[in-house]
Image (cartoon, rainbow, N blue to C red):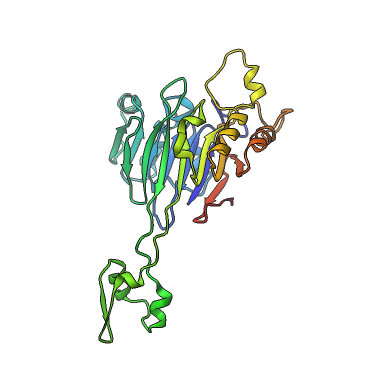
């Protein structure tokens, strides 16, 4: 499973970071999924290895502009790219009204099927490779996280055992994979005897803006990967004259350590933490790491990460 960060800034774009967008790919799949679509996401896609023609589904975490203002441009460019694959947009209440208004006023004729689905907390959806559950977060507007559970692999054939019996890969392998017994040299081979133990699917949460990471509760326990905002250090947040409902590095580290999260990728970085300031992203990393002993990454634009079946995240 690969994650490509297309935008990692909080609130507004900077010279280093665009606003929120994340592409997710599964192995042996001819499509990919986009989580959030901030302004200029289509530009970021063009600079990445991803293709708008293979984009099939978009998920929007909440109705703040830095998470969905990129939709009109991306949807329109899809037509100009002659990418007519149907597209589904999942989002909170309001996303349907927004898109229908934009498309109506601009007289856009997309030329492909666009489906808009508004969800609420605890809704679940089933896809080819995974199931997805919508989880409520705490923010200044309704905000959500997506709990993704990859399907288990339950029909993997013991090829080594079959080859040892003299059966090379053939159509008979396919019959065994479907659970059918076969006859080889007059002897019945039972599918159950040549099927490996199921390989558990990976699990991750991709969260929108949120001031309480602990609100995810039991969904965090033993999860393979959490992608979560980390907008401020605790000290900077404490000195804000107007408190904004975001997560601090200290709080994030404490929660994921308590819940035994295996891997954490922090994103949604406040523009104050940049290469030219006295405080770079290292202060966020160090504050999380002080409290969290798992694998930690601070995402940058165009970073690509792989979540392996061994539950280890690696930066590519």
Q: Where is residue 266 in the image (x, y as percent from the top left)?
A: 57, 37
Q: Position of residue 76 (x, y in %)?
A: 38, 35
What is the count of numbered marks?
0
Q: Name the image quarter holding residue 143.
A: top left
Side (left or right) of 30 relative to 251: left
Q: Name the image quarter holding residue 197.
A: bottom left
Q: Residue 42, can we see it?
A: no
Q: In the displayed orientation, state which residue is furthest to the bottom.
A: 185
Side (left or right) of 44 relative to 141: right
Q: Of residues 72 and 145, which is closer to you in this image?
A: 145
Q: Where is residue 204 in the image (x, y as percent from the top left)?
A: 46, 44
* Vertical placement of residue 192 versus 275, above or below: below
Side (left or right) of 41 relative to 134: right
* Vertical placement of residue 247 versus 226, above or below: above
* Vertical placement of residue 135 versus 25, above or below: above
Q: Residue 128, can we see it?
A: yes
Q: In the displayed orientation, state which residue is furthest to the right.
A: 278
Q: Of residues 152 and 227, which is closer to you in this image?
A: 152
Q: Where is residue 182 in the image (x, y as percent from the top left)?
A: 26, 77
Q: Name the image quarter holding residue 298.
A: top right
């Amino acid at each position: 499973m690969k994650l490509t960060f297309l935008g990692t800034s909080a609130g507004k774009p900077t010279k280093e970071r665009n606003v929120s967008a994340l592409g997710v790919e599964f192995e042996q799949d001819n499509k990919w999924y986009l989580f959030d679509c901030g302004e200029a996401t289509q530009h970021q896609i063009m600079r990445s290895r991803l293709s708008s023609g293979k984009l099939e589904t978009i998920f929007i975490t909440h109705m703040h502009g830095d998470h969905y203002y990129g939709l009109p441009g991306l949807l329109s460019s899809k037509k100009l790219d002659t990418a007519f694959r149907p597209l589904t947009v999942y989002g909170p209440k309001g996303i349907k009204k927004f898109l229908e208004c934009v498309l109506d006023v601009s007289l856009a004729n997309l030329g492909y099927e666009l489906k808009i689905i508004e969800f609420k907390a605890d809704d679940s959806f089933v896809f080819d490779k995974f199931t997805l559950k919508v989880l409520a977060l705490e923010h200044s507007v309704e905000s959500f996280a997506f709990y993704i559970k990859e399907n288990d692999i339950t029909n993997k054939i013991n090829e080594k055992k079959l080859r040892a019996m003299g059966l090379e890969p053939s159509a008979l392998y396919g019959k065994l994979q479907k659970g059918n017994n076969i006859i080889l040299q007059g002897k019945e081979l039972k599918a159950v005897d040549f099927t490996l133990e199921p390989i558990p699917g990976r699990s991750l949460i991709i969260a929108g803006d949120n001031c309480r990471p602990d609100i995810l509760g039991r969904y965090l326990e033993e999860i393979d990967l959490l992608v979560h905002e980390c907008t401020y250090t605790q000290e900077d947040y404490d000195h804000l004259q107007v408190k904004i409902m975001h997560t601090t590095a200290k709080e994030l580290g404490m929660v994921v350590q308590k819940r035994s999260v295996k891997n954490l990728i922090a994103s949604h970085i406040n523009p104050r933490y940049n290469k030219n300031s006295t405080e770079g992203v290292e202060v966020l990393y160090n504050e999380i790491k002080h409290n969290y002993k798992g694998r930690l990454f601070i995402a940058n634009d165009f970073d690509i990460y792989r979540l392996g079946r061994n539950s280890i995240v690696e930066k590519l």
